[in-house]
Image (cartoon, rainbow, N blue to C red):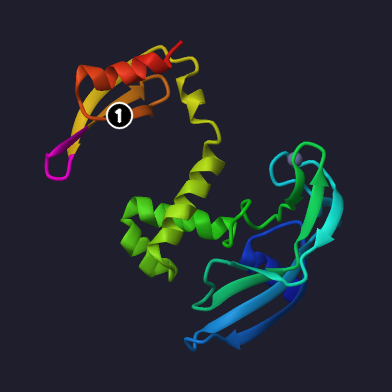
């Protein structure tokens, strides 16, 4: 039989952590909240969030930080941990990375990615309603997810041989964008506002 810790780790969908304890609570809006106190396993503790190198610990925050996770069975999920500040040889004193969240985020990776998926499949207002957060959170989730999936968008232009160019309108045909695709990989490599020669020149100027 699976232990309670294993079940909670599965609900959180996160590896390399140790669950310290978990409790059920009610928040100020009378919603049920699953509060999970946890910490990274030793091998994942005190790592720089930028370069990932193992660092020495500088100090520890006196209070636990909270991350909002994906809802589970109607429960709001919150993760708690007292983060360390670490000394990275490349990035000086910096808050350590945690396995469940992107750097500088108050939400888990899963939250960010699901919020982004819903926002792209529907719209930001719908995503905010579904995720029970405000739309500015959705914007930040989209940015973090994009940075994770594609840290360097300029690489899209590497090895470009066969391209297709098209224009499409938005706002009921009042505004246009120019879209360039890579026919070899079937991916969009560039989008520019407008549909003039100048717009397309912006794309060609990016090429070496
Ligand atoms: Zn670093």
Determine the residue positioned at 84% across, 54% down. 58
- Tell me, yes or no, whether the highlighted magenta stretch contains residue 125: no
Quadrant of the rendered image containing residue 35: bottom right
Q: Quadrant of the N terminus?
A: bottom right
Q: x, y (%) of residue 189?
A: 39, 26
Q: Nearer the viewer, residue 152 or 199?
A: 199
Decide if residue 47 is on the left or right side of residue 66. right
Vertical arrangement, residue 79 with respect to residue 161, above or below: below
Image point (44%, 68%), residue name: 133
* Secondary structure at numbered mark 1: strand
Closer to the camera in the image, 205 or 159: 205
Q: Magenta part of the protein: which range?
A: 170-176
Please state which of residues 86 and 97 is positioned toward the viewer in this rendering.
86
Callout 1: few (<14), some (14-19), or many (20+) C-alpha neighbours within 10 Å? some
Q: Residue at x 49, y 30 (%)?
A: 153
Does residue 111 show up?
A: yes
Q: Circle 1 is placed at which residue position? A: 192
Q: What count of labels does the image hold?
A: 1
Residue 200 figure quarter? top left
Q: Is residue 1 visible?
A: no
Q: Position of residue 157 (x, y in %)?
A: 45, 20
* Residue 18 shown left or right of residue 25 in the figure: right
Task: Using the rendered view, name the quadrant where residue 171 is placed.
Answer: top left
- Queried on whether the Cβ of the residue with tag 1 lies below 8 angstroms from ligand 1, the answer reads no
């Amino acid at each position: 039989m699976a232990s309670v810790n294993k079940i909670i780790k599965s609900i959180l969908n996160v590896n390399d952590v140790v669950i310290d304890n978990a409790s059920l609570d009610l928040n100020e809006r009378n919603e049920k909240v699953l509060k999970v106190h946890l910490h990274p396993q030793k091998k994942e503790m005190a790592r720089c969030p930028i370069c990932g190198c193992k660092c020495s610990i500088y100090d520890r925050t006196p209070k636990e930080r909270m991350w909002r996770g994906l809802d589970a069975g109607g429960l709001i999920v919150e993760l708690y941990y007292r983060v360390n500040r670490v000394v990275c040889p490349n990035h000086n004193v910096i808050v350590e990375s945690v396995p469940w969240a992107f750097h500088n985020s108050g939400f888990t990776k899963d939250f960010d990615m699901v919020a982004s998926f819903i926002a792209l499949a529907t719209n930001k207002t719908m995503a905010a309603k579904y995720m029970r957060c405000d739309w500015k959170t959705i914007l930040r989730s989209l940015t973090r997810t994009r940075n994770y999936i594609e840290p360097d968008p300029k690489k899209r232009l590497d090895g470009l041989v066969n391209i297709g160019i098209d224009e499409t309108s938005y706002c009921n045909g009042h505004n246009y964008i120019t879209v360039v695709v890579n026919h070899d990989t079937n991916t969009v490599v560039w989008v520019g506002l407008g549909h003039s020669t100048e717009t397309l020149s912006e794309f060609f100027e990016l090429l070496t």
